[in-house]
Image (cartoon, helix red, strand yellow):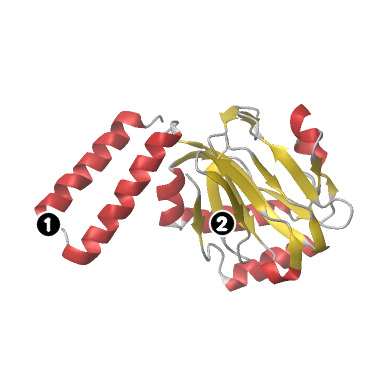
Amino acid sequence: MLITLDDVLTGEELASARALLAECPWESGLATAGPQAAEVKRNRQVPEDAPHLPALRRLVLGALARDPMFFAAALPLRILPPFFNRHGGEENRYGLHTDNAMRQAPEGAWIRADVSATLFLSDPEDYDGGVLTIADTFGSHGVKLRAGSLVVYPSSSLHEVTPVTRGERLACFLFLQSMVRDAGHRRLLHDMDMALLRLRQEIGETEPVVRLTGVYHNLLRAWAES
């Protein structure tokens, strides 16, 4: 399930993120690449000891926490601290890969990566290329969103960032463990949640809507892990 969310960051938050990134050091993206990804990863990212990284992470996590559409799409149980990367110049791409299944949190615990997300921080007209291409059962989908927008997709998907041939592409990327492990179950729950939202808007909290809401929560109760 691939879902895009517009305006996850406000204009003020986007400006703050860009200002902080302008003062950050950068290191090779290989610092967080597994053996397979290391063969195709050619970008830069903000290192763990960068002074502004905690503020950047708080900004992104705060924006996600207030966005009900993000919760509906990902059903997050645990979110790893976000990372920030840059594509441009000679380090301008990230070839076809699958994200690692397990990720280690700062406190040392291992977290299963069910869902990946990319938050775009550069305006699409400021760079050429840099398309996030995600493959699923229905083919490949190219994603290049306006700054402040987010795409959510299964971590199991094959995906890549095409070469940036002009300008610079800044983004935040993150991984999370979902309460609902199965991607098909997450899709069904999301579709039902969005349909219920529309029904409430169109006909209100009628008895059938209340009953269907109960079905949603009982399915979530059956499939969720906590």
Residue marked by disc 2: 150
Q: Of the residues shown, which amino acid type is indicated by label 1?
A: Thr
Q: Nearer the viewer, residue 44 or 108?
A: 44
Label 1: element kind: loop
What crowding class fits label 1: few (fewer than 14 Cα within 10 Å), some (14-19), or many (20 or more)?
few
What percent of the width, then of the height, locates residue 210?
16, 50
Marker disc for residue 206 = 1
Q: Is residue 22 above or below residue 178?
A: below
What percent of the width, then of the height, locates residue 178?
47, 37
Q: Is residue 68 above or below residue 40?
A: below
Mark with earlier residue (2, 1): 2
Q: Of the residues shown, which amino acid type is indicated by label 2?
A: Leu
What percent of the width, then of the height, locates residue 192?
30, 47
Can you tell which quarter of the image residue 55 is in?
bottom right
Whether residue 45 is visible: no
Q: Is residue 77 left or right of residue 96?
A: left
Whether residue 146 is visible: yes
